[in-house]
Amino acid sequence: MARRFGPTDFAACARCGSGQVHAKLLIMGPIAGVDSDSRSFVCHACGHEGLPIFFDTESARAQFEREKKGIWPAEPAPASKGPVSIPILPIQTDPMIDLKILDLLPGRTAVVTGVRWEAGGLAPTGYRVSFQDYWDAIGGPRYNASRIYMLDLAGINRANPNFEVTRHLGKRCDVWLDSGGREPEEVMDGYMLDVERVVAGSKTLASIDSFAVLYTLSSDVLPCLDWDGHVVWREPRETQVDLPGVAKALRGIGFSAICVMDLRRLGSELGPDPALLSNLEGLDLDVYVGGGLQESDVLRLGEQGFAGGLVDPYTPVIRDLLRTPKPEAPTEAIAPAPAPRPTSSPRTVPDSTGPP
């Protein structure tokens, strides 16, 4: 019987998806039982009359039929992702820097420094290099970092974030930025810098109520619970300092992920505190742990169910990448010793007097 679609088309019934679709034959026509109505098709499986649906392949048509019958293919299992390893970059800047110089050399005006928790603040250590040199080390093929956890020390310690500098640095990679905002609105200012995530640290917020306000402003904000044996808040009168309790309260607010920074171990490279990890077991949250971590610790965190780790700024691996190779000392070219010349015997060389 004649068909009104090409030989490479695969027609399916619009009701049941069957491929048994044919042009409707005319009972009364010039040649009854042979001529067909080019505008009507009938499904021999369910009897539906109407225009079919065309597919490029038979497998696509068969999948459509299975879906019509309510038979859906099993969802492929998502590829398991390993724990995320993110270097911590404490940035020290000069807020009065000339903006013309900044536009030309933004990576040279910011310094990545070591950091320790002292007297209620993040104190820079003597170990420091320019952001440009640091990024050349961790952004290269040997370390291959694609994301950094940036601590704006001017904002955290003095409530004076240097957005002009961090805005330039954020163009090089994905940044999780803790700019030290004291109020929820100040924390949200970080999104003006086009960073991947804005981090809100408890050490600069007054209480857990600040996190509730932040969640109403943006659910993408990443809370960071700063911990030195208890949760650290800017307001010492805040009574909610139990780490598991505060983490569960954040989950109740609606957050699905948090960071936990062990301030006592930050910069020590001693690895995560086992007591801290035990406090974080069983939380219905993606937890990123920081404070004292080296790269190898992140893999073990993944085995324990953590989402990732925040690596100390100057681990042995990073220090090795930053080590400037010694220039080769110039060597003196040693000339060959002059060969002794044979002395000529008398009359061996012709002279102007002619032969003897």
Image (spheres, grey):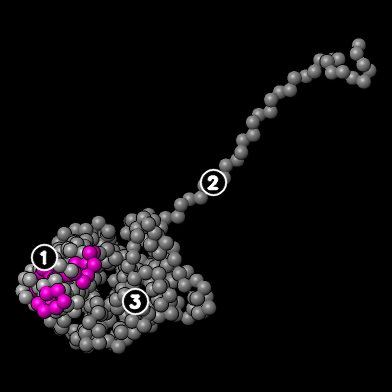
| Residue 2 at x, y percent in the picture | 18, 69
Q: Residues within 10 Å of mark 1 (few under 14, many from 20)?
A: few
Q: Quickly name the residue at label 2.
A: 329
Q: Amino acid at mark 2?
A: Ala
> Disc 1 versus disc 3: distance between alpha carbons?
37 Å
Which mark is in front, 1 or 3? 1
Q: Secondary structure at mark 1?
A: loop
| Residue 313 at x, y percent in the picture | 33, 64
In terms of sequence position, does the residue under pointer 2 or pointer 1 come before the other? 1
Q: Secondary structure at mark 3?
A: loop
- Image point (34%, 63%), residue name: 145
Residue 351, numbered label: none
Residue range (magenta): 3-32
In-front residue for pair 312/308: 308
Q: Quickly name the residue at label 1.
A: 74
Q: Which secondary structure type mostly characterizes the magenta part of the structure?
A: loop
Vertical comparison of 314 with 325: above or below: below
- Image point (35%, 66%), residue name: 114
Q: Specify whether residue 14 is painted magenta.
A: yes
Please identify the quarter of the rendering in which residue 201 is found. bottom left
Q: Quickly name the residue at label 3.
A: 195
| Residue 26 at x, y percent in the picture | 12, 77
| Residue 233 at x, y percent in the picture | 23, 81
> Disc 3 versus disc 2: distance between alpha carbons?
44 Å
